[in-house]
């Protein structure tokens, strides 16, 4: 820490004043002692005898005159007092500097840190203050990001609700104003309003589900499940729908033993439902949807939901799990999605301590889910997925 010129002069003056005061004190003491000894012959004789009898070393050096001894001791004591006073004053100045820096930071200069180094425990205080400012800034940044993300959520939701709502109001307005020519028109308008209301309902449902599973402390109703059996049931429930689209759907696993794991079945089914529904919705021209489970290690299972529809563009792969993200072609096709399905799936998988990613090429699109067998043994997300490059 650098002292200002004013502080240096203050320190110097403090030293000078202390030395003067000490010299005066020494003089007063000296006079007092000399007078006491002079006026007391017995004491003087006693001191003389002590001096004669106390000798040092093999050459029998005698002590100096008592005045010299006394002055020597006084000088050592004086030097210690001066040192102590200067150090104390210097510490006060350091503290003053630290307080000034704190005021500066508190006045909104949050990118500032206490820049100097000081000695001893005060440095620990400086380090703690700097660390505290760092963590406050970090929390403020997080808070801002959350705030921003909430604003975006509201904007997206308002936009997505406004679109069907405008149609509903439009069609109901036509009915209200009797602007229809036949019973068929009337039915057509009510049917469109009904479809748009259902679209709105599914958005609100998805949104509700999304906000529920987004919270990391969302409770799971954990039970032991047979993952293979769950996938088979799920595939069976989608068979009819797949047939209508000219596709087939199947589930398989590579294990002789049941793939048992701890999970919230209702939520996990929601994940696979979303993935299969997407494969049906976006897998135009494809023929097969497969759900394949396998054991990766004793504590980890993998499920691949694969379809042979059109490839997802490379640029979209890293964004596809973001809420409200929809690949451009899907938007234009009006498939009626909310863009929340994969975000919900990702949050549910994360709640189970697992991770999900997507791979897509000209032949296949696969959503790959890794889940821990036991919920309290969460998996570590591989680095390549953290950096957003699944393949
Ligand atoms: P939604 O289906 O409601 O649009 P999702 O979050 O489920 O929202 O999906 C996000 C986007 O990912 C979809 O709009 C679609 O473009 C793309 N997508 C998801 N699954 C597939 C798939 N199996 N094949 C091709 N594209 C897909």
Image: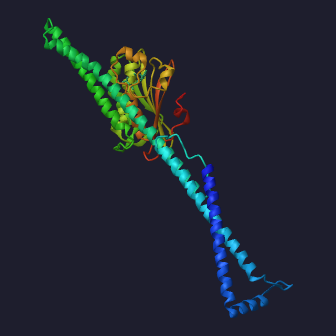
Which residue is found at the position 42% from the left and 42% from the top? 260
**Residue 112 coordinates in the image, percent (x, y):** 53, 42
Q: Which residue is nearer to you in this view: 185 or 104?
A: 104
Which residue is found at the position 44% from the left and 47% from the top? 376
Q: Which residue is nearer to you in this view: 81 or 370?
A: 81
Q: Is residue 262 above or below residue 74?
A: above
**Residue 234 coordinates in the image, percent (x, y):** 35, 30
**Residue 171 coordinates in the image, percent (x, y):** 20, 14
Whether residue 296 sits left or right of residue 174 in the image: it is right
Which quadrant holds residue 181? top left
Q: Is residue 54 visible?
A: yes
Which quadrant holds residue 208? top left
Q: Is residue 12 above or below residue 29?
A: above
* Quarter of the picture holding the C terminus: top right
Ligand 1 sits in which quadrant? Answer: top left
Which quadrant holds residue 196? top left
Which residue is found at the position 49% from the left and 19% from the top? 313
């Amino acid at each position: 820490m650098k002292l200002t010129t004013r502080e240096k002069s203050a320190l110097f003056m403090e030293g000078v004043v202390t030395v003067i005061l000490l010299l005066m004190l020494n003089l007063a003491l000296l006079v007092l002692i000399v007078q006491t000894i002079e006026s007391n012959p017995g004491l003087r004789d006693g001191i003389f005898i002590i001096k004669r009898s106390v000798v040092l070393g093999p050459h029998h050096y005698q002590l100096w005159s008592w005045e010299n001894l006394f002055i020597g001791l006084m000088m050592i004591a004086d030097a210690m007092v001066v040192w102590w006073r200067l150090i104390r004053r210097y510490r006060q100045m350091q503290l003053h500097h630290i307080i000034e820096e704190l005021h500066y930071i508190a006045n909104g200069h949050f990118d500032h840190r206490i820049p100097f180094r000081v000695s001893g425990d005060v440095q620990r205080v400086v380090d703690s203050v700097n660390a505290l400012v760092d963590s406050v800034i970090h929390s403020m940044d997080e808070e801002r990001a959350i705030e921003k993300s909430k604003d975006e959520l509201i904007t997206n939701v308002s936009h997505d609700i406004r679109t069907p709502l405008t149609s509903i109001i439009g069609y109901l307005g036509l009915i209200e104003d009797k602007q229809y020519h036949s019973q068929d028109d009337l039915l057509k308008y009510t049917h469109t309003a009904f479809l748009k209301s259902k679209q709105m309902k599914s958005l609100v449902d998805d949104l509700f589900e999304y906000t529920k599973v987004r919270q990391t402390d969302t409770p799971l109703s954990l039970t032991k499940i047979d993952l293979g059996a769950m996938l088979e049931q799920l595939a069976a429930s989608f068979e009819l729908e797949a047939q209508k689209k000219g596709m087939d759907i199947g589930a398989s696993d590579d294990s002789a033993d049941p793939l048992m794991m701890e999970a919230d079945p209702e939520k996990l089914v929601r994940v696979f439902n979303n993935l299969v529904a997407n494969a049906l919705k976006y897998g135009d021209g494809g023929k097969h949807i497969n759900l394949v489970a396998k054991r990766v290690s004793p504590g980890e299972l993998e499920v691949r939901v694969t379809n042979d529809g059109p490839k997802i563009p490379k640029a979209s792969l890293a964004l596809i799990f973001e809420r409200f993200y929809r690949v451009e072609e899907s938007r234009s096709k009006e498939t009626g999605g909310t863009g929340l399905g994969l975000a919900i799936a990702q949050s549910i998988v994360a709640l189970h301590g697992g991770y999900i990613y997507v791979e897509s090429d000209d032949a296949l699109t696969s959503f790959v889910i890794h889940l821990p067998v036991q919920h309290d043994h969460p998996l570590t997300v591989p680095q390549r997925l953290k950096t957003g490059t699944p393949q």
